[in-house]
Image (tube, rainbow, N blue to C red):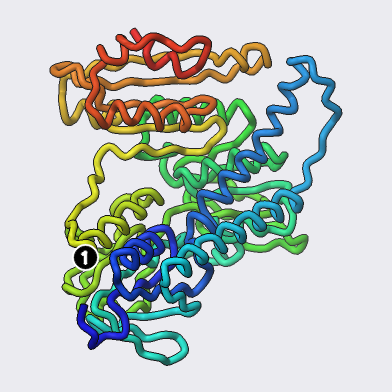
Amino acid sequence: MGNSFDHDLFVIGAGSGGVRAARVAAGHGAKVAVTEEFRVGGTCVIRGCVPKKLLVYGAHFAEDLQDARRFGWDVPECGFGWPALRDTVQAEVSRLSGLYRQTLDNHQVTVLDERATVAGPHEVLLASGRRVTAKVILVATGASPVLPAIEGAQLGITSNEVFHIEQLPRRLVIAGGGYIANEFAGIFHAFGVQVTLVNRSSQILRGYDESIRDRLQQISLAKGIQFRFNAELARVEKADDGSLRLHITGSDPLACDALLFAIGRKPNTEGLGLAEAGVALDGQGAVKVDAYSRSSVDSIYAVGDVTNRVQLTPVAIREGQAFADTVFGGKPRTVDHSCIPSAVFSAPPMAGVGLTEAQARNRYGDIKVYTSDFRAMKNVLANRHERALYKMVVDATTDKVVGLHMIGPDAPEILQAAAVAVKAGLTKQDFDDTVALHPSMAEELVLMR
C-alpha cells in the first residue's frame, strides 16, 4: 500500500463495527489506527445491549423468587439493592472494554483516546491538534439518544445515564414506545418502581408484529405498568421537593421522581467535518453509503448506526467485516440486510425474524397465518396467568415461512435457532415434518395447525 500516508486505515469510533473493521483490516496486513473519545467497546458494550441484558437478568429474580414458593422453596421476603447490581454490571462493562482494547493491541492496531474529526478525504484532525493522514477513513461513530426540544428536557436522562443512577426512583416516567422504552419499563417495574410509559402515538413498538406487541401491552398492563397514549410532553419542571412535573398536551400533568427519554437515536455526525469533506448525509444526519459501505467520497467509508441502515450490533459487525474484506482483503462482499432476527428484552421478551403479518399481506397478498397461544408449563404451576404467543406467517403460494414472531419466556433463545430455518427458506411442511421436542416451549413451533 502507498507509503505516502501515516496509516492505510484510520477508524473513527471503537464500537462494535469499528473494532471489527480495524482488527480484520490489520489481519489483512493494513497499518491501522482507531480513535475513541469515550471508551473502547461502543454503545453495545458500554451503555447498551450488554449492561441492559445484565439488568434484565437481575430483574428476572423478582418473579423467580415469587414463583419459587409455588415450587416448594421456602423463600423469605427478599429486598433488592440497586447499587450492588449497578456496580457489578459496571465492573463487567469495564472488563469487556478492556478485552476489546486488548484485541486491538494484539492485532497491532494503534488506539488513540481522543476525539477525531474528518479534515479531508485522507486527513483526520485529532482533538490534541495533531493531523493524521490515511489512505482510507472509516466512520463508525454510531448513534446517540435524542432529547426532545422542550423546556426542561435537561431534567430527564437517557439510556446513557440510566445505568449510573444513584438510587431507584419511586416513580419513573419513560417517554417513548420503542424497544428501549419497553425494556426499561420491565426492568424498573421488577425492581419495585412505579412505571408510566408516555407515548406520543397510540401504540407501542411500531414496526413489530401487531399481535405480539399487543400481547406485551396486555401483560404489561396486568403487571401494573401504566401507559399514556397520544400524549406529547410539552415541558418539564422541577418541584420544590425535587420531584418532576411533566406537562403533557391533551392530558393531565404527571408527577414523577425521574424521567427517562427513549424517543429515538440519531447518527453521531454533528461537528465531524463530514459535509465539509464532501460526504453526503441524509435528512437524519446519517452517512449515505452504497452496498459496500462507501460514502460519496471514494476514500471515506461508514458502517454501523452512523449509516442508519439497521441499528443492531451484529449488523455493524458484519458491515465492518465486509468493509475490511472488500477494501483490504481483496474479497469484495456486501451484507444482506434482509431477514435479520431481532429481540426485545421486555418482560416477557419478544423476538422476530422476517416479515410481520401486515408486511407479508402487502407483499404476497395470499398468506396463511398460524398461531400458538399457550401458557408455559412453568407459568401454570407458578399460578402466573401470562400467556405466550407464537405466530408463523407463510406465503400461501410457495408454503415458505416468511415470518416468525414470538413473545414468551426465552423467546430470543428459541428464535435464533428458528431464524436459520426462515433464512434458509424452509416451508411450513418442513416445520411440520420435525418431531416435537417435549416438553418444551419451542415445540409449539412445529405443532402449529
In-image side of 170 versus 150 (left or right): right
Q: Secondary structure at mark 1?
A: helix
Asked if 396 appears above or below 40 in the picture, the reply is: above
> Where's residue 196, x and y in %?
60, 42
Q: Which residue appears at 74% of the width and 25% of the height?
A: 66
> Where's residue 443, x and y in %?
44, 14
Asked if 27 appears above or below 115 in the picture, the reply is: above
Q: Which residue appears at 49% of the width and 74% of the height?
A: 37
Q: Toward the viewer: 50 or 389? A: 50
**Which quarter of the image is occupied by the C terminus?**
top left
In-image side of 101 versus 28 (left or right): right
Q: Toward the viewer: 31 or 169? A: 31
Q: Residue furthest left?
A: 397
Q: Which residue appears at 45% of the width and 20% of the height?
A: 389
Mark 1, residue position = 327
Tell me how many marks there are: 1
> Where's residue 100, x and y in %?
50, 61
Q: Amino acid at mark 1?
A: Val
Asked if 145 appears above or below 188 in the picture, the reply is: below
In-image side of 402 versus 344 (left or right): left
> Where's residue 84, x and y in %?
76, 51
Q: Residue furthest bottom?
A: 129
Is residue 389 visible from the viewing direction of this image?
yes
Q: Which residue appears at 74% of the width and 15% of the height?
A: 71
Is residue 236 visible from the viewing direction of this image?
no
**Which quarter of the image is occupied by the N terminus?**
bottom left
Near mark 1 (Cα within 10 A), the count class, few <14, some 14-19 or many ≥20, is: some
Q: Toward the viewer: 407 or 261? A: 407
